[in-house]
Each structure stands twice: as C-alpha cells, then as structure tokens.
Amino acid sequence: MAQHERPLSPFLHYRWQYTNTLSILHRLSGVFMSLGIALFVYWLSAIASGQAAYDESLACFSSPLTKIALFGWLQAFFYHFLNGLRHLGWDLGYGFEKSVARKTGTVVFITAVVLTALTWWCITSQITASVSGGVL
Amino acid sequence: MSLRSPLGKVLGAGAAKEGAHHWWAQRISAVGLVLLAPWFLLSLIALGDLSYVNVHDWVASPVHTVLLSLLVLALTYHAFLGLQVVIEDYVANKGIRLLVLLVIKFTLLVLGVLGVISVLRIAFMGNH
C-alpha cells in the first residue's frame, strides 16, 4: 500500500488555550508518576527486608534531592488526581460546557498546588523526625 | 459495502481491533485509585512517626495489607494503560513501539509483583 503524507492529528490548528496545556499536563504528570512507582515499591520492599534496610531507605528519603523529587511527585499526583476527577465527570457527561471546563481547570490547578504544599510539608517533616528519632 | 453485522462492528470496534475494554479498564482502575491513593497519603500523615516498628505494624494489619496490595496492583495497571496510550500516540515506528511497550509492561509487572510480595511478607513474616 502506498504511503501518503497524511496529516496527523491534530491537523486542524486550534487557537492555543490554557485548557490544552491542562490536558497535556495530565499526560505528563501521569508519565512522571509512573517513575515514582519504583520508589514506592522500594519503600515497601525495604520494610519487608527488615530494620537495617528500612533505616537505609529513610536516609534516602530524607536526602534533599529525594525531598525535591517527592515534591514533584506529590505535585504530579494531586494534579493528575484532581484533573482525573474532572475527566471522569466528563465521561459521565458533566462539566463539558466551555465556561465550566475552564472554571474547573483553574480550581484543579490551584487546589493541586495548595494540597501539594501541605502534604509535602507534613510528610517531609515526619521523615526528618523519624530519621533523627531512629538515631537515638 | 461491509459484510459485518452491526453487532460484529460494535464488538470488533474498528481499527484498534478491540472493543472498549481498554477505555473501561482505565476508568475502573482510576476509580479504584481515587479511593486508594488518598487513603494511603492520609494514613501516612495520620501515622505520624515513620519509624520501622510503627510502619511495619501498620502494613501488617489485615485491612491495610489488602488495601496496600490493591493499591500496588491498581497503580501498576493504571500506569501501564496510561503509558500504553501515550506510546501508541507518539511512537510511530511499529517495531520500536512494540519493544517499548514490552519493556514497560515487564518492568511494571516486576514492580507490581515485588510490591505485593513485599506487603504479604510484612504481613505473614510476623514480628520485626
């Protein structure tokens, strides 16, 4: 079969709107979070391996680099989670109107940032406390 | 003219050579994660002290063991379905696409099994 230079989707050029960015961020955050599964499973296997391995994992989680990565993962999680609810609403036929979709998009973005900051602060301070507590 | 029956068309559903299974699986696993993921984060925060004994005992409680195993399974399954769509959209070469999909599938399978076995080991191996 002859190969034609067919236009690839989206072959119509839409005006760029922030809702487009929100949609792409859903995919990006999903891909990024998939990498985090390795860290989650590492944590579980460390608990299963005993005290020494778990303490090692706490040291890893309390390093500044991992804390920054945790911030990224939490941000990706809350965004993907809230935007996912928005998608599930659309699947059920709710919130498709342009004005509503824009409003929920803004709410999702702001709520994700706030929840990330709160959760990150809680969890990193717990990790830090547990590391210094474990040294005793 | 198509010789396929209307029912066959619906069940065979087009060029993807499969029905709506993928779409449904993605949504159902998403709904599972909507419940499990916040449960996990809230539990971690409520746990407070993340020392070994505390975390170990928390995982070993029967309800937590089940929910954590389900979380690992839902997470890896949902991740695979999502990554699959992204790869099918952006990797045009069929050979590379298949290779990447297989690598991702096996990696997630290993992580999923490791995660569930870890949770079960914590639950069944008893005291620290």
Image (spheres, rainbow, N blue to C red):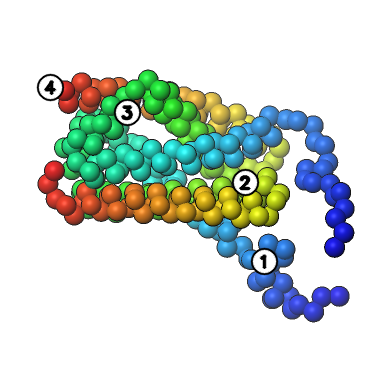
- The three-letter code of the residue at mark 4 reads Leu
Q: Chain of mark 2?
A: B
Classify mark 1: residues with Cα within 10 Å, few (<14), some (14-19) or many (20+). Answer: few
Residue B47 shown left or right of residue B92 in the figure: left
List the residue tagged with mark 3: A60
Distance between the alpha carbons at the discs numbered 4 and 2: 48 Å
List the residue tagged with mark 4: A136
Residue at the spot x=18%, y=54% of the render? B124
- The three-letter code of the residue at mark 1 reads Lys
Badge 2 and badge 1 both on one subunit: yes
List the residue tagged with mark 2: B86
Q: Chain of mark 3?
A: A
Badge 3 and badge 1 both on one subunit: no
Location of residue B39 in the rendering, given as x and y in whole percent from the top left corner: 35, 42
List the residue tagged with mark 1: B17
Most foreground residue, A85 or B64: B64
Badge 4 and badge 2 both on one subunit: no
Distance between the alpha carbons at the discs numbered 4 and 3: 18 Å
- The three-letter code of the residue at mark 3 reads Cys
| N-terminal label among 4 and 3 | 3
